[in-house]
Image (cartoon, grey):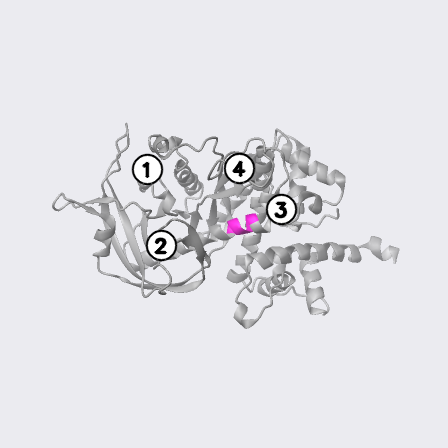
Amino acid sequence: MLEVNNDWVIVETNTSNFNDKRLDKRYKKLLGGFASSPNKSIPGTFKSWGETLSAYRFFNNKDVSVEGILSPHKSATIERIKEESIVLIPQDTSEIDFSKRQAITGMGYLDDKFTQGFYIHPSMAITPDKQCLGIIDFQTWTREALGSRYTRKNRSIEEKESYRWIKSYEAANQVAVAAPETRIISIADREGDIYELLEKMPSESNKAYWLVRCGQQNRLVINRENGEDSRLWEVVKNTVPIGEIEFTLPSGTTYNRDKSKRKARKERRVQQVIRTRTVHLKPTKRKGKKLNSISINVIHCEEINPPCEEDKIEWFLLTSYPINDVKAAFDVIEWYLCRWQIELFFKILKSGCTIEELQFSTYQATLNCVALYMIIAWRILYLTMLGRNSPDLPCDVVFESCEWQSVYAVLTKKPIPKQPPPLHSLILMIAKLGGFLGRKSDGYPGVKVMWIGMQRMKDFAQAWEIFQSDVYKNCV
């Protein structure tokens, strides 16, 4: 297979150490190869049987682990984080379903005994303008038994699956220690509404802030004036509004009105009225453990005039970040809206990299391969957003000469310019290779057309290098 130089691969693997130089070298080759064909199988990516066999041996090697694969990327990500003033770290869970396959050694249950697979829970670093910097934490687990609600309720927090949200905050806190000049905000959806997480208020040991969407718990609030308890939702709703915000809610899925099952959700504009309040939470009761009362900031976002066929969009956002003025409240809301980037990441990982179609016989080898694909998914999301945020950047800052020159030649049918075109222009060209029409009403290209376009770009780049090489010229 002709190798296309990838400077970014060198950066993301610079500190790799598998205690075997051959494994380190193979790791770099695999990352570059997977980047060129993110939605192809391993045999489809590597043309020769020898290269394909080497790939399978790498993922099955006892000295290869998820931590070893992701550690160099995490180091590179922290260096990118240090260059920013504010970095958001959303975390979320997704199931990886292998139910339609023969039983795979090491995998467990998903929702019921007829399903098999595993769960992933990554934390990714992004800027407030939605530029993805990389993955800083990755947790996985399987369910050996389904259990019951009673048995789960009586476990300690450390024994529950929900403890992953606290561990992800702790990983974000480690980043805050490593990048002391950067404000770090860990973001979690409703499942992260856990009292032990909310207890982690700013202190010498808690450098990272947290932002959590309130779950189904209408927590008790202590009224310090009369000593009576009230409910959080009612207390905040009685607060005078401070303003309004408007944004586009992306398409996706949501629960129906009785919360029994999920349904499709169309993209639409949302206008919300905003309220803020500082409240004193009454501690949750835990068996054999005493929790303390805490003061947290709450932002209530309630949709105005929702469509008659849709539920209104209403959030209670809990945060340890100080809300000293209206601007701070609106900043926090904008940060929460950035959480949807991790949903795009999952979409790339599953639909673009097709990780649920991997053909390994063990859970560990599958997991190792998924870890490598996570770096590929980050790269696709990074390039998609970079074109939006830095449109005038010369494209050769990101792409190799053979990449941008081959794409330019194929799509424009013009001589190669002396100065590389702007990044925005090249991103649009790559998207067109993936099926993007580029009409005025189409907006900016999404991740799906980008990962298809990038695969075609790699094919053009390889052909370009061959046709430009002295070996080819001597042959003709």
State the separation of the CA atoms marked 1 and 4.
30 Å
Q: Which residue is mark 3?
A: 9
Q: Quadrant of residue 411?
A: bottom right
The mark that comes first in sequence, 3 or 1, is 3
Identify the residue shown where x is 56% and y is 48%.
Answer: 350
Residue carrying label 1: 196
Q: Earlier in the sequence, mark 2 or mark 4?
A: 4
**Mark 1 and 2 residues: CB-CB less than 8 Å, in contact?**
no
Which label was assigned to residue 317?
none
Mark 1 or mark 2, which is nearer to you?
2
Disc nearer the start of the sequence (1/4): 4
Task: Say few, some or many: other residues with alpha carbon within 10 Å of mark 1 (under 14 / 14 to 19 / 20 or more).
Answer: some
Q: Which residue position holds label 2? A: 257
Q: Vertically, is 193 above or below 410?
A: above
Q: Are marks 3 and 1 in contact (CB under 8 Å)?
A: no
Identify the element where label 4 is drawn.
loop
